[in-house]
Image (spheres, helix red, strand yellow):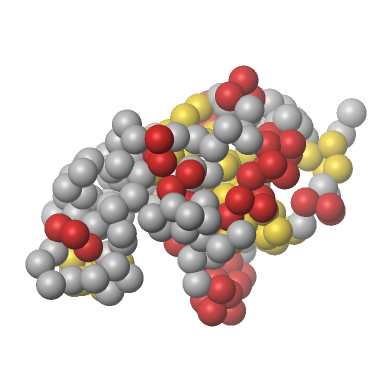
Amino acid sequence: MRIEPLTDALIVVDLQPDFMPGGPLAVAEGDQIARPIGELAREFSTVVATQDFHPRDHVSFASQHAGRKPFETLALYGGEQTLWPDHCVAGTPGAAVHPALPDERVSLLLRKGTRVAVDSYSAFSENPGPDGTRATTGLGAWLHARGIRRVFVVGLARDFCVKATAIDAVREGFTTIVVDDLTRAVSPANAAAVDRAFADAHVARVTAEGLTVRT
């Protein structure tokens, strides 16, 4: 598959220290994809980096719910909220974008999960809020305005924010490709379910090795 630098965009999802091994919400082998993602970013004219950026008392933190533990689920706004360890608190080193992603290649830095009462997995919209609606981030309109037709999605974590971003990208009208070997999951046991979700949403999957750049 050829990368078209002017009409393709790369979305780098939550490549942040708190998701790396040793972080409070570590994704196994997350550190192994940082450098290859940084190298891939140099092949695109448009690179969007998302950044979890939570208030200290964010609704998704298990610490904010008495008697609850990380990775439990909670009924919230008519849906189900996974509770997480405190992570990516705004302004902390763990919330920074990983240094392997070259800053000069990032066209847009999109912070998500910034509202205390609403979580956000997708780069395109927040999770449902108290009124049951999903607030848009405006990313879809921004990409369309730049002439983007396809998006390639990489980063962390495959079974949550990467999945939500890729599926929403299709809904926004983009041909969507997940570069599978440049993602890692919170729970590898979710792989089959995520594969089905991608297939049902018409999200394509490739490997980095299968990408070439049109010159």
Image location (x, y in percent) of residue 144: 54, 32
Q: Residue at x 38, y 55 (%)?
A: 24
Q: Residue at x 89, y 28 (%)?
A: 215
The residue lying toward the viewer, choosing from 55 and 146, is: 55
- Residue 46 lies in quadrant: top right
Up/down of 61 relative to 212, above or below = below
Up/down of 132 relative to 213, above or below = below
Q: Residue furthest left?
A: 66
Q: Residue at x 84, y 53 (%)?
A: 210
Q: Residue at x 48, y 44 (%)?
A: 17
Q: Is residue 167 visible?
A: no
Q: Is residue 15 visible?
A: yes
Image location (x, y in percent) of residue 117: 17, 50
The residue lying toward the viewer, choosing from 60 and 95, is: 95
Q: Is residue 139 left or right of residue 178?
A: left
Q: Residue furthest front?
A: 22
Q: Residue furthest right?
A: 215
Q: Give the number of callouts.
A: 0
The residue lying toward the viewer, choosing from 111 and 20, is: 20
- Residue 137 lies in quadrant: top left
Image location (x, y in percent) of residue 184: 59, 61
Q: Is residue 206 left or right of residue 155?
A: right
Q: Is residue 22 left or right of residue 150?
A: left
